[in-house]
Image: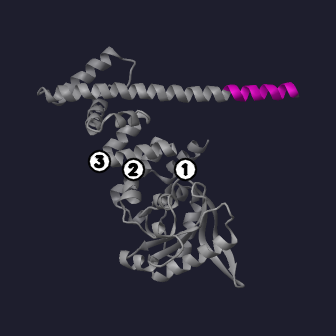
Amino acid sequence: MLEINKYFVLLDNIKREIKQRRIIAAVAVNAELIALYWSMGKVITESLGQSNWGDSFLVQLSKDLMSSFPNSKGFSKSNLYNINKWYNFYKSAGEFFQQAVGKIPWGHNVMIVSKARDLEEAKWYIDKTLENGWSRTILNIQVESDLYKRQVGSAQINNFKKVLPLPQSDLVSDILKDPYVLSFIDEDKDEKALERSLVQHIQKFLLELGKGFAFIGNQYRIEVGGESFSIDLLFYHVKLKCYVALELKVGKFRPEYAGKVQFYLTALDRQVKDENDNPSIGIVLCKEKHQIIAEYALHGMTAPIGVANYEVKHKLPKNLQDCLPTPEEIEREIMRASS
């Protein structure tokens, strides 16, 4: 039995080494491919700038390259067009971007360049892809739902910087979005219906919330002064090391919601969190909010609270509904990524 156990340990070590070497080899191959495309993009751009060839040049170049290298992929007219567009997008950005784009696959590069409005947005998607290990499907979900604008460019309403120390306040601000795109929800007639839908599709909701969220439960009960209270949805964020309480509202934001959430956060901090946890944070997720009313409501609050909108499937623009992956595709991607 001891020899068998030794064998399995040996087998696991070898398998781990093979996987690590494959990853290293894949990264190296990808870097070389990106470097090749960068050189090609430079030549194509300079050639087009010095002649009147136009699109016919790319057509002929594609034919000649595919004829010379029949076993190689990536020389179609459409990909040569992508290479040219990609190179021109980054050519003025310097060596840093040349190195950064080499760390993500070519399909990711094409997708980011096709949607990013500027270099800052492109860099954000590159960094998030590397940080979270996004596949192309997941990146497509985030890009098509305009995650950058919702998380970085949105007018977030919260008091994190006033009540939390650095760098905790910045880290907490980074997880808040506005709006949250709940493309998997068809019905939100009341809070209970919305809560049931979110719990039913918890994997998809966790994907929308972002990396680091762990679901604790819904209608989480706490007792204060002999009375029982329930938090709509409770999560724990492993990176922030804190509990996150969500209050769900299908109507407009009301000032009293902030006071209710602060009450919950006080109870969580006194009864649930331990000495190693950071202060709990709260998010009021509502269908709509008036910015000034929300800002007034948070003024003077001592607990960290954010207010954000959500959008369900039937409220999304038709073009966005059509381009987002189906719930089945998202589920398959989540299972693939976790396997």
Residue at figure coordinates x 26%, y 36% from the top left: 85
Distance Cα–Cα, label 3 vs label 2? 13 Å
Please give left or right for residue 85 compared with residue 168 in the image: left
Q: Say if mark 3 contacts mark 1, CB within 8 Å.
A: no
Identify the residue under disc 3: 118
Q: Position of residue 297 (x, y in %)?
A: 44, 79
Q: Position of residue 13 (x, y in %)?
A: 70, 28
Please give left or right for residue 111 compared with residue 335 in the image: left
Q: How many marks?
A: 3
Q: Is residue 13 magenta?
A: yes
- Residue mark closest to the camera, 3 vs 2: 3
Residue at figure coordinates x 55%, y 57% from the top left: 206
Distance Cα–Cα, label 2 vs label 1? 18 Å
As drawn, the residue found furthest toward the left would be: 52
Q: Is residue 224 magenta?
A: no
Q: Earlier in the sequence, mark 2 or mark 1?
A: 2
Identify the residue under disc 1: 331
From the viewer's side, name the closer residue of 247 and 319. 247
As drawn, the residue found furthest toward the top would be: 68
The local secondary structure at tag 1 comes to: helix
From the viewer's side, name the closer residue of 206 and 193. 206
Q: Judge whether residue 134 can be spotted in this image.
A: no
Against 21, residue 243 (above or below) is below
From the viewer's side, name the closer residue of 207 and 148. 148
Please give left or right for residue 167 compared with residue 82 in the image: right
Picture quadrant where residue 72 is located: top left
Residue at figure coordinates x 18%, y 25% from the top left: 47
As drawn, the residue found furthest toward the front would be: 165
Identify the residue under disc 2: 143
Q: Which residues are magenta?
A: 2-14
Distance Cα–Cα, label 3 vs label 1? 31 Å
Three-letter amino acid code at disc 1? Glu
